[in-house]
Amino acid sequence: MGTLAPGEQHAPFSELWYQQQQQTLGDFVCRQLGFYVIPANLKLSVVIPVYNEDRTLRVLVDRVRAVPIRKELILVDDCSRDRSREVLQQLESEGAADDFNRIRVFYHEVNQGKGGALITGFSKVDGDIVIVQDADLEYNPTEYPRLLQPIIEDRADVVFGSRFLGDQAHRVLYFWHYLGNRFLTTLSNCFTNLNLTDMETCYKVFRREVIDEIAPRLVQKRFGFEPEVTARVARRSYRVYETSVSYSGRTYAEGKKIGWKDGFQAIWCIVRFGLSD
């Protein structure tokens, strides 16, 4: 293990950092704490759909950049009507010379929906692993290492971050939304034969090869993306893992966008893509 100068620290999840944790804590404790090595040459693609998120966008991007993993941030503005585009232009300019956190921005001139923004973003990725990140502050980017671990350790091809596994904090909000999520997840499981607890989660992580196979087939432009991508993953028998994530949900007054019409669309997508590709 390399010698550290006074006050110097190895980058978290690096090889030298992990060796240091092993010597201090031992293998068992490191495993329980989720400590492992993220390869230095690994590149994470973070695809972020943006629609009227000027209040949270900069804070979210700063949180993503703070994660100690080499990454590219692919932000797709879905024809925002607020100051999101101005914020995106500033962020792109600031990150132009940052190879560790490269920022790339793409713009839709017509609103297409979250799924449409993700389809655009997926077509631009060049990282080894791809994760979906909403532009609000409902999901916490500090949990990326836990989400990536099953893929990096070659146990999974796709990871879902579940809000309902029960060992992470989540804001208590709408009972009927919770019930709707559970219903949609259960219905999806009936068609896919997966046993997910949270099909509708934002945090979905893919090996690059999975995105290369699935993304060109995606057609759902709004929130139907979630059941469609789940069905396509299940049909190809990829190894799917689920890990718990925290959740700080928004109220409608705070900018939440999904509504009851999206729930009916999700039911149609579950049946449609559950029956055929």
Image (cartoon, rainbow, N blue to C red):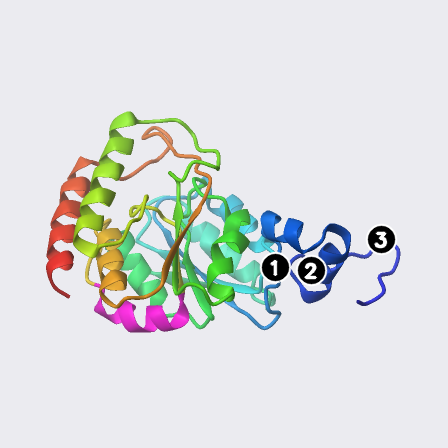
Prevalent SS, magenta region: helix
Residue type beneath disc 3: Gly
Where is residue 133 shown, x and y percent of the image? 42, 52
In this image, 210 relative to 190: left or right? right
Mark 2 nearby-residue class (10 Å; few <14, some 14–19, many ≥20) = many
Per the image, label 2 sits on a secondary structure element best described as helix
Instruction: Tell me if residue 138 can be seen.
Output: yes
Instruction: Check the picture and name the quadrant holding the C terminus.
Output: bottom left
Stretch of the chain drawn in magenta: 207-218
**Residue sitting at 47 percent across and 37 percent down?**
167
Q: Quickly name the residue at label 1.
A: 36
What type is the residue that disc 2 sits on?
A: Tyr
Marks 3 and 2: which is nearer the front? 2
| Cα–Cα gap, marks 1 and 2 | 6 Å
Mark 3 falls on what kind of element?
Answer: loop
Quarter holding the N terminus?
bottom right
78 horizontally vs 42: left or right = left
Where is mark 3, residue-wise? 7
Mark positioned earlier in the residue sequence (1 or 2): 2
Q: Which residue is mark 2?
A: 18
The structure residue drawn at horizontal position 19% and vertical position 42%, both measured from the top left corner, is: 262
Residue drawn at (43%, 38%), measured in percent from left and top?
247
| Sequence-earlier tag: 3 or 1 | 3
Q: Quick check: marks 1 and 2 in contact, CB under 8 Å? A: yes
Mark 1 residue crowding within 10 angstroms, few (<14) / some (14–19) / many (20+): many
Which residue type does callout 1 highlight? Tyr
Residue shown at the point (52%, 48%) measured from the top left: 143
